[in-house]
Image (cartoon, rainbow, N blue to C red):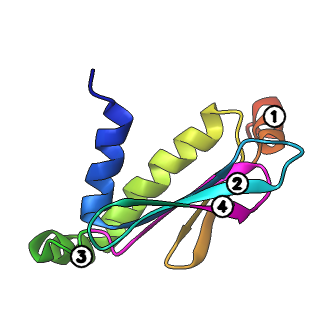
Amino acid sequence: MINIYKLALDAIAALSDITIESNSSDTDRIGLRLTFDSNDERVLEPITRNKGTTVIVQNLFSPYPPHRMYLLQHQRKQKEELHMVAASFAMSLDLNIALSLDNKMVIQSSPADREKRESDPF
């Protein structure tokens, strides 16, 4: 059986530089960092971090100049769509979500924020 998450991760790695840092423990501060080397091989290394997962995607479409050019030419629309998707996740999931674009924080949401929005949406 094909692991769909593995295929998705490989596809994103082929289109960009991706780093995933994660720790699922409340008590242990040792987590893992997943990156891909120049041969698209997975590299796992231990890191110190709090509980949670961070996904960093950089240089999207850099291996494909026409797609990269389109992305850069339509940056505003692409950012608006990404913002809308992340905001939907932030409103519907019981997670802390932070989205930054070009090193600028765009969305930062927590379950407490969600409870506040549900009790007083306006």
Disc 3 crowd rating (10 Å Cα; few below 14, some 14-19, many 20+) is: some
Give me the residue at 70% from left, 54% from top.
31
Chief secondary structure of the magenta portion: strand
Asked whether, in this view, residue 8 is left or right of residue 99, the answer is left
Q: Amino acid at mark 4?
A: Pro
User: Residue 75 — which label?
Assistant: none
**Camera-side mark, 3 or 1:** 3
Would you identify the image quadrant in which residue 29 lies? bottom right
Disc 4 crowd rating (10 Å Cα; few below 14, some 14-19, many 20+) is: few
Which residue bears the numbered disc 1? 115
Give me the residue at 22% from left, 77% from top.
73
Asked whether, in this view, residue 59 is left or right of residue 30, the answer is left
Q: Amino acid at mark 1?
A: Glu
Residue 103 lies in magenta, yes or no? no
Task: Write the start and end of the magenta stretch as one range.
Answer: 45-60
Which residue bears the numbered disc 2? 31
User: With respect to residue 70, does 54 lie above or below?
Assistant: above
Residue contact at pointers 2 and 3, CB within 8 angstroms? no
Q: Position of residue 79 (x, y in %)?
A: 40, 64
First-in-chain label (2 vs 3): 2
> In whole angstroms, how far apart are the C-alphas of marks 2 and 3?
29 Å
Q: Secondary structure at mark 2?
A: strand
Disc 1 crowd rating (10 Å Cα; few below 14, some 14-19, many 20+) is: few
Q: Secondary structure at mark 1?
A: helix
Q: Secondary structure at mark 4?
A: strand
> In whole angstroms, how far apart are the C-alphas of marks 2 and 1?
29 Å
User: Residue 62 — which label?
Assistant: 3
Q: Amino acid at mark 2?
A: Gly
Residue contact at pointers 1 and 4, CB within 8 angstroms? no
Would you identify the image quadrant in which residue 25 lies? top right
